[in-house]
Amino acid sequence: MPRSTRLRTYLAWARQKLCPWKRARKEAIKAIRAGWSIPELAREAGTDRQWLHKWHDRFNEQGKTWQSLDDRSSRPHCCPSMKRHLHEKAILEARQRYPALGVVRLGIVARLPVSHGTIHRVLSEHNQIKKKKRPWRPFKRFSRPFANYLWQMDITQVPTKSEGWVFILSILDDHSRFLLASKCFDKELNTGDVLGVVKKACQSWGKPRQILTDRGCQFTSTQTDGPSLFTLTLDAMGIRHIMGRPHHPRTQGKIERWHRSLKHDWFAYREQQPGLKQVHRILAQWLEFYNFTLPHWGLRLQTPGETYLASVMTPEPIARSVNEVLG
């Protein structure tokens, strides 16, 4: 009896449950190994080519053994609901540790082995998702083409337990969002304080082409209509001073957003207002976390440290404390 006829018979018996399917699969493999082509065998035996390709490929992939033709359970290899149950505790602990991060960056930072959808479902079930209605506002993005082209600079303040307000001066690279320098002051800053931080940052990272600031009294001239001491000093250093429009903080949006993250994502979740020493410690922790751990949406989920170091191609070791808090 030709093998095609024999295979047709076994297929008919298997459909009527008169013989196991393995016998029909085995006969199909024997026919292919005897020289039959799959299209010809499918036409003569009255079956489809996909079925023959499936079992022929499985037979070859698993060492050409007849055990590879056994029936297999249709049970799925993994159960998403069970996986979510196993990692639910880790997801909630990560949310408690990083309460301000969204589900995507939370999964990356905490290295959770589940999808972003699973993280969102778990947090939603435990009322850990805060929905905010934000009005749409048009804006224009800008970014310099490489690192150390433009630095953004600004001053913010945070309350402390006993010293009143602490003022924080920060410098951020426009291209990479990398925090180049940050320093705490227990008093309001003057132009000399600001220039001291700028010069120390230039010694560490080189001079930028431009520095962008707002129109605070530390950066502008209040006595005359001419350039300020800050602008004249930058000109002598070969740096162009750019100032944003009055009452338009979005021009310095990157450094403004960084200060917001510092206060809302880091300081806001402390049990009590810190003292001056605690502010230094918290700021150092935030710089380490922000520069080298936290992925940035504007950088395609790379960290600012990766983007900055890749752009400047610094010969210095990466292990150097590039995020040192100036003090």
Image (cartoon, helix red, strand yellow):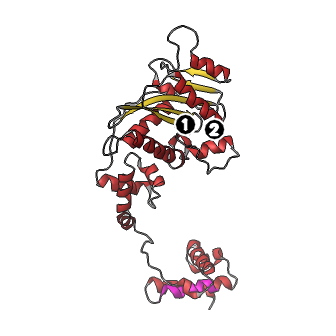
Nearest the camera: 34 or 219?
219
Residue located 57% across and 78% down the image: 55
Q: Position of residue 237 (x, y in %)?
A: 67, 24
> Which labelled disc corresponds to residue 62?
none
Q: Position of residue 104 (x, y in %)?
A: 45, 50
Is any atom of residue 147 visible in this view? no
For disc 1, the marked residue is: 181
- Give the mark nearest the N terminus, 2 or 1: 1
- Callout 1 amino acid: Ala
Q: Position of residue 79 (x, y in %)?
A: 40, 68
Nearest the camera: 273 or 79?
273
**Dot 1 surroundings within 10 Å: few (below 14), some, or many (20 or more)?**
many
For disc 2, the marked residue is: 204
Residue located 43% across and 71% down the image: 76
Nearest the camera: 126 or 55?
126
Residue located 63% across and 22% down the image: 234
Residues shaded magenta? 19-30
Q: Secondary structure at mark 2?
A: helix
Q: Position of residue 311 (x, y in %)?
A: 66, 41
**CA distance separating discs 2 and 1:** 9 Å
**Which residue is at the far bottom?**
1
Residues under numbered marks 2 and 1 in contact, where contact means CB atoms less than 8 Å apart: yes
**Dot 2 surroundings within 10 Å: few (below 14), some, or many (20 or more)?**
few
Instruction: Specify the quadrant that holds the N terminus.
Output: bottom right
Residue located 41% across and 50% down the image: 103
In this rendering, the answer to whether 28 lies above or below 95 is: below
Nearest the camera: 109 or 225?
225
Magenta-span inclusion, residue 10: no
